[in-house]
Amino acid sequence: MSGEAGADRVALVATILLALATVATAWSGYQASRWNAEATKATGRSNAARVESTRDSDRANALTQVDVAMFMQWVDAYAKGEQELSDFYFARFRPEFKPALDAWIATTPRTNPNAPLTPFAMPQYRSAARESAERLEAQADELAATARRNIQRSTNYVLGVVLFAAALFFAGMSTKLPSPRLRLAMLAIGIVVFLSTFAWIAASPVSVSV
């Protein structure tokens, strides 16, 4: 009877382990799918932000070229003493460029050897489009890093599926071997694999968003 009772206990524990490992395998598979979807969404947002950053960067470069061209025309007219033409160009500088130009003029560049060579070297020269491009680029990098983390989480859950499947295998084999020692050994291995994997997966981030 003791042998039969021992076999019954092994079968009972194996059945419980099979049930728990089956649920854990399904959960890990679901989480792997969820985190893969999160990675895909983060990658899409990262690509969109990078496209917007490139667009703003191109716009900033185009506006800088306009500023440079206008500045050169203004300097040429100013150097030739063509006041009317100089005033004409000055009145048409972009609002973003004028603070830098005013600050540069205040340094008396004609007589001050330490003055910056152009207004473009002044800290007042700022471009909203370039700042937007830099902000979007940083956002794109952050989203790309998030995508990589989510891919790693998905991979971890896939590994969890494999390990829980191994626990299922050992639990199933423990009910089919003729030797009581082999049954106990298989069941013990299955329990260790299951508990170790469960502890690891339980500490992993969970995604339940739709």
Image (cartoon, helix red, strand yellow):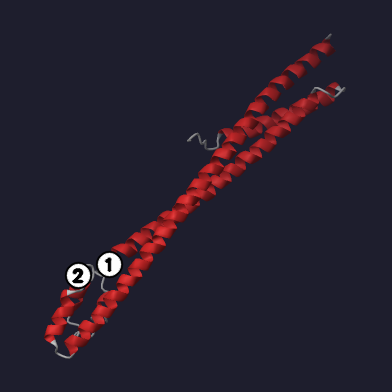
First in sequence: mark 1 vs mark 2: 2
**Residue at the (80%, 22%) spot, across then down:** 175
Name of the residue lying farthest toward the bottom: 80
Q: Is residue 164 visible?
A: yes
> What type is the residue that disc 1 sits on?
Arg
Place residue 5 in its image quadrant.
top right
- Circle 2: element type: helix
Q: Position of residue 82 (x, y in %)?
A: 14, 88
Any mark on residue 192, and which?
A: none
Counting labels gives 2
Question: Residue beneath label 1, please?
Answer: 126
Residue situated in front as seen by the camera: 160 or 193: 160
Q: Is residue 107 visible?
A: no
Name of the residue lying farthest toward the left: 84
Q: Position of residue 100 (x, y in %)?
A: 22, 72
Name of the residue lying farthest toward the top: 1
**Residue at the (58%, 42%) spot, across then down:** 154
